[in-house]
Image (cartoon, rainbow, N blue to C red):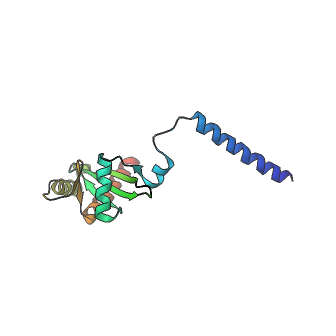
Amino acid sequence: MKHITLIKQTLINAALMLIILSTVVPPTSASPLDLLFGRAAVPGSELHALGTAAISQNHGDATYFTNGKGRVLEVRARTTEKGILRVSVNRVYIPRNYNGSAKSETVYDRLSQLATKKNAIRAGSYTMIDETTGWRAYLYGKQITKALDSE
């Protein structure tokens, strides 16, 4: 009997703590849905353009974009039942002269070349790149980020 009373009291205390926190702590810009499914994209924004391009190209699966200046985006998008476009964007940066590496310079130049390509799909200031090149560049950018973070 004491065990059941203890469980009830713990649940009540936890519920009260959640109520107090939800009323005292100011809301943040990110909702739990943003963490799970990406941010809600406002029509006319660059995020909306990226998400729309990802849905039209790969049905919302990983789609890669570059700005031609070393930035690579991995964009995933989905439309909710209510018609809201939710977009998650992962960003990496590839410096042209990272550790004097020829690979870094080659990848940077290739991204720059793809960004200025005629007839490319554009979303805001970004240009969609093919999946293989985008995936490789994104992974390389993640390796650079990991190496820089470990220093």
Location of residue 89 with respect to 28 vertically, above or below: below
Left or right: 144 as drawn, with respect to 16:
left
Q: Nearer the viewer, residue 71 or 13?
A: 13
Measured as percent of width and height from the top left, residue 131 is found at 27, 64
Q: What residue is at 29 percent from the left and 47 percent from the top?
A: 46
Is 150 or 106 nearer to us in this picture?
Answer: 106
Give the residue furthest to the left.
118
90 lies above or below 15: below
The residue closer to the viewer here, 102 or 116, is 116
Q: Residue at the front extreme? A: 82
Quarter residue 53 falls in? bottom left
Q: Residue at x 87, y 53 (%)?
A: 1
Q: Residue at x 35, y 61 (%)?
A: 60
Q: Is residue 140 at all visible to an observer of this figure?
A: no
Task: State the image coordinates of residue 17 (x, y, percent, origin top left).
Answer: 66, 40
- Image point 20% across, 51% down: which residue? 68
Number of marks: 0
- Which quadrant of the view contains residue 137? bottom left
Q: Provide residue 4's location: percent of width, then percent of height.
A: 81, 53
The extreme right residue here reads 1
- Tell me where residue 59 appears, x and y as whole percent: 34, 64
Viewer can see residue 129: yes
